Image (spheres, helix red, strand yellow):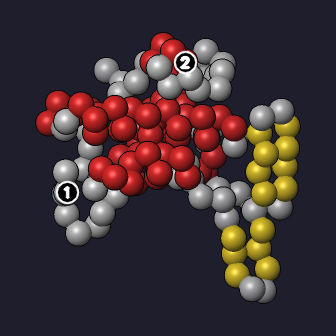
Amino acid sequence: MAYVTQDYYLKEFHGEAVQGADFPSLVERAAEIIEELCMYRIQESNMESYSQDIQERIKKAICAQIEYLDANGGSDMDNGADIQSAGLGKFNYTRVSGNSGNQEQSIYAPRAKRILAPTGLLYRGGRCL
C-alpha cells in the first residue's frame, strides 16, 4: 500500500494534474526520495507510530515531491545528465556548470522540506517527535 493514493493527491492535497499512467511511478519515486530526506526514519510500515499531524505532513510532503518531480521531468529526474537547458511542456531542466563550481537542481522539493520542517524528521541528531 502506498503512502498516498491518486485520489488523496488530487482531492486532499489539490496537486497539479498528473497523467494517470505516470502516477504509480511518481508516487513510488517520491516516497523513496522523502524517506531518504528523512534519513529513513519513515516507512509505510511504521506510519501508525506517528501522530496524525505528522502522518498528514508526511503524506503532504510526498504529494509535494510528486508535483515537483512531474513539473521537472518525471520519476527519472534524479538519473543525472549534463544538460545545460531543456524544456518541453511541464518539463524544464537546467544544469549549470563552470569554473566557479557546479549548481544543480535539487532532487528534493523545496515545499516538501518546508512541510516536514516542524516534524523533527529532517534533524540529523536523532528522532525528535
Secondary element at image label 1:
loop
Q: Which of the 4 image quadrants contains residue 73?
A: top right
Question: How far, Cα to Cα, is label 1 from label 2?
Answer: 30 Å
* Of 66 and 76, the residue lying toward us: 66
- Residue drawn 47% across and 20% down? 12
Give the labeled residue for mark 1.
128
Residue type pointed to by label 1: Cys
- Picture coordinates of residue 86, whole percent (x, y): 84, 49
Q: Which residue is mark 2?
A: 10
Q: Residues within 10 Å of mark 1 (few under 14, many from 20)?
A: few
Residue 20, image x, y percentages: 61, 15
| Mark positioned earlier in the residue sequence (1 or 2) | 2
Q: Secondary structure at mark 2?
A: helix
Q: Which amino acid does the dot numbered 2 rest on?
A: Leu
- Where 65 falls versus 102 (above or below)? above
Instruction: Using residue 4 as the reference point, say whether residue 127 is left or right of it.
Output: left
| Side of 3 relative to 82 (left or right) | left
Residue 95, quarter of picture: bottom right
Q: 47 above or below 82? A: above
Horizontal placement of 30 versus 121: left or right?
right
Which image quadrant for residue 128?
Answer: bottom left
